[in-house]
Image: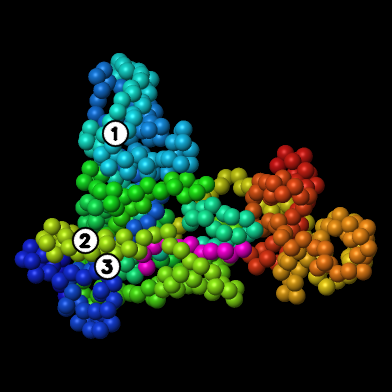
Amino acid sequence: MKTIEEINEKIRDGNVNVVDALEMCDIVEELGAEEAAKEVDVVTTGTFGAMCSSGMFFNLGHADPPIKISRMWLNDVEAYAGLAAVDGYLGVTQLSETKGLEYGGGHVIEELVEGKSVELRAEGFGTDCYPSRKVTTEITLADMNQTVMLNPRNSYQRYNAATNSTERILYTYMGTLLPDYGNITYSGAGALSPLYNDPNFDAIGIGTRIFLCGAKGYIIGEGTQHDPENNFATLMVKGDLKEMSTEFLRAAVFTRYGISLYVGIGVPIPVLNEKIAANCGVRDCDIETNVLDYGIGRRKRPILRKVTYEELKSGSIELFGREVKCSSLSSIKKAEEIAKLLAKWIKKGEFLLTPAVEPLPRKGSAKPMKLARRKKRASQIMSRQVVVVRPYESIRDVAKNLIKGGFNHLPVVSEDDKLVGIITSWDISKAVANGLVDGKVEDIMTTKVVCAFEDDPIETVAHKLKKYKISAVPVVDSERHVIGMITSEDMSKLLAKGE
């Protein structure tokens, strides 16, 4: 057993033993957790990835004559001004009003840290003590009074991996996802992850001093959407923006999604006992996450398979019997650099550890938004009486079914009842006209089927009907079993009712 004060004495004396999380894996494997706890004093971790829930509080100082700011913009990116006369908060995902998805709050913060000036525009409504109504000026980070990076949600313990089952490219916060399971993206540092090296928060807590974007910062609480019960814990952190470096803080544009900020975080873990040492021996092969289909609505995204970070970092994994390439949205190289730099600071006596004043919550999960008026979903308006056909059935027999049933669309399903195509009365008519009446369904069916998922909002269904110029879509579950059909007539009836 050790205490943080004892470790700090070793830091001051220059005889502390500090290793990074990757080195600790080998030490625990070689010596065992008990001996590793005696040998090692501090394990450093690191992560460098896109952390959208980030931003800065700042104070501009008073103008002469003064202004009570009601709205303000930095390089045409609006900052929140509802705090006090000249205080503001700039979120990294806020978009420029002139450059749209190509520039935002993350860029403004990076440029300020880099030493550049930005244009400040501010408006006020005028009062006796704050008579000015408008201000336009150039301002730098040094011109501001306080500049506090305060990030509500950083350093996820782990992330789900993402892929796409649809026939079109999806542009998401997990990057660009190619059609038909064309790629898999993931994030997080794996074995270097701060919260995976202390999964029970035995050492990390409120008040823990950390490495934050090249400066010293602090954990000030659990992050928003903190979900420790499912290994999705998060951190809320703060630090002085004036001390930070763009080497560990970079704005990013996610194509057709928006702006984020790459944030570098390193957390030192004091090895106080054997239990902490054992947890710090975690390897990529021990950390498991889910591959999710982002082509399906968030509430019912299926888990396609479990996968380890070791498999993801290999560059490809097997999915549905084929190799699919994997790519990381985080920089593992930068995460290693952060862990090593933090270790160097500690060894040189430039960074002391702080005990947590309170542990992070070990219970809790992230809940979905409660909607007072829920939007109608595909499953609520679809017809459940769906006739399906097999690829090997004859066109002649299918034509009879169409006439008998009085419908115009027939989903085609495989032997395991999964959607593989669709035929319409128009397809049948063309087949008859071309003398193919004795052919099979598979000869004329459309294989690239535009479909809806049971959890899709009706607005999404309407968009698909309009975009692809079609009059109906089959509704499928997460395994592509046909469970219903929605036609343009169904949508028209809904609109007629004012729903």
- Amino acid type, callout 3: Asp
**Mark-to-mark CA distance, 1 and 2:** 30 Å
Residue at 27% in and 21% down = 66
Tell me, yes or no, if residue 363 can be seen here: no
Q: Can you identify the residue that label 1 sits on? A: 117
Q: Residue furthest front?
A: 434
**Can residue 276 be seen?**
yes
3D distance between C-alphas at marks 3 and 1? 43 Å
Q: Which mark is residue 342?
A: 2
Instruction: Mark 2: give few (<14), some (14-19) or many (20+) Cα within 10 Å.
Output: many
Q: Secondary structure at mark 1?
A: loop
Regarding mark 3 in the picture, which secondary structure is present there?
A: loop
- From what the image shows, is residue 1 above or below residue 380? below
Residue drawn where x is 24% and y is 79% of the image: 27
Whichever of callouts 2 and 3 sits on the residue coming sooner in the sequence is 3
Work out how far the residue at label 2 is from the one at label 3, CA to CA, in angstroms: 20 Å
Q: Nearer the viewer, residue 469 or 3?
A: 469
